[in-house]
Amino acid sequence: MAKDEDVKLVGSWTSPFVMRPRIALNIKSVHYDFIQETFGSKSPLLLQSNPVHKKIPVLIHAGKPIAESSIIVEYIDEFWSSAPSILPSDPYDRALARFWASVVDQKFFTPMKASMGAEGEAKNGLMNQAVEAIGLLEEAFGTLSRGKAFFGGDHIGFVDIAFGSFLGWIRVAEISNGMKFIDAAKTPGLDGWAQRFSAHDAVKDLLPDTAKLLEFSKLLAAKLKEKH
């Protein structure tokens, strides 16, 4: 690992948004301390470090906090600027990467999260929205990868991290709903990509155990239903 100034990451093993900076730090070979938050509570460190949103993840670098997963990943890429780069060097390609990362959050994650606390037709409608987003990402992979292994080409890039961090939760959703979001028949590009991404050295030790994540999802779903 590279010798760096004091680097801490406040987060949770269950959060796909926390996984994003963890993957980025691994790609850059940056040593960091992972500070695990307790589900259902917010530590004084978290509240002090992110007083606006009060959410994980928060990167604390040399005593300075940075919040929001995508912003943290960009910071990591800029500060530890040695290869491999996470964002493309070309301005247009960088804009495309940011756009598709936002599609992941808005078109895929938003309905997926809402579906956890929904039932019946409302749940089915939200799941269909997530499936449509997967279709868009299948097409985007064909364009952005240019026939290579990842959205970022030969190496894991910004969109790979944005979407790949949800793979654990996608598996849980597939089990819970008896359906496939990513498979060789409907999404061959993403199917191969998901296998390569999951096996990558920067990723494989971070992917949460599916059984444990499934148990956590039941707890989370119960809490979401309480709010409705």
Image: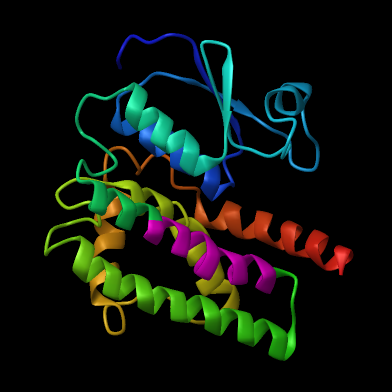
Does 16 sit above or below residue 104?
A: above
| Residue 21 placement (x, y as % from top left) | 45, 36
> Residue 144, how many percent across, how many down?
22, 62
Q: Which residues are magenta?
A: 99-115
Task: Give residue 88's quadrant in the image.
Answer: top left
| Residue 227 placement (x, y as % from top left) | 87, 63
In this rendered view, identify the residue nearer to me: 41 or 114. Answer: 114
Mark count: 0
Residue 110 vs residue 51: left or right?
left
Residue found farthest to the left: 147
Q: Main secondary structure of the magenta part?
A: helix
The residue located at (29%, 42%) in the rendering is 87
Q: Residue furthest front?
A: 91
**205 lies left or right of 110:** left
Q: How is the image coloured?
A: rainbow
In the rendered structure, the answer to whether residue 43 lies left or right of residue 100 reads right
Looking at the rendered image, the quarter that the N terminus falls into is top left
Residue name at image x 47 percent, y 57 percent: 166
Q: Is residue 29 above or below residue 184?
A: above
Front residue of this view, candidates 166 and 108: 108
Quadrant in which residue 4 is drawn: top left
- Relative height, residue 144 to residue 120 (above, below): above
- Whole-percent x and y of residue 158? 34, 47
Quadrant of the snapshot with the C terminus: bottom right
Q: Residue at x 73, y 35 (%)?
A: 52
Whether residue 147 is situated above or below residue 18 in the rendered picture? below
The stretch drawn in magenta includes residue 156: no
What residue is shown at x 45% (from left), y 64% (from top)?
103
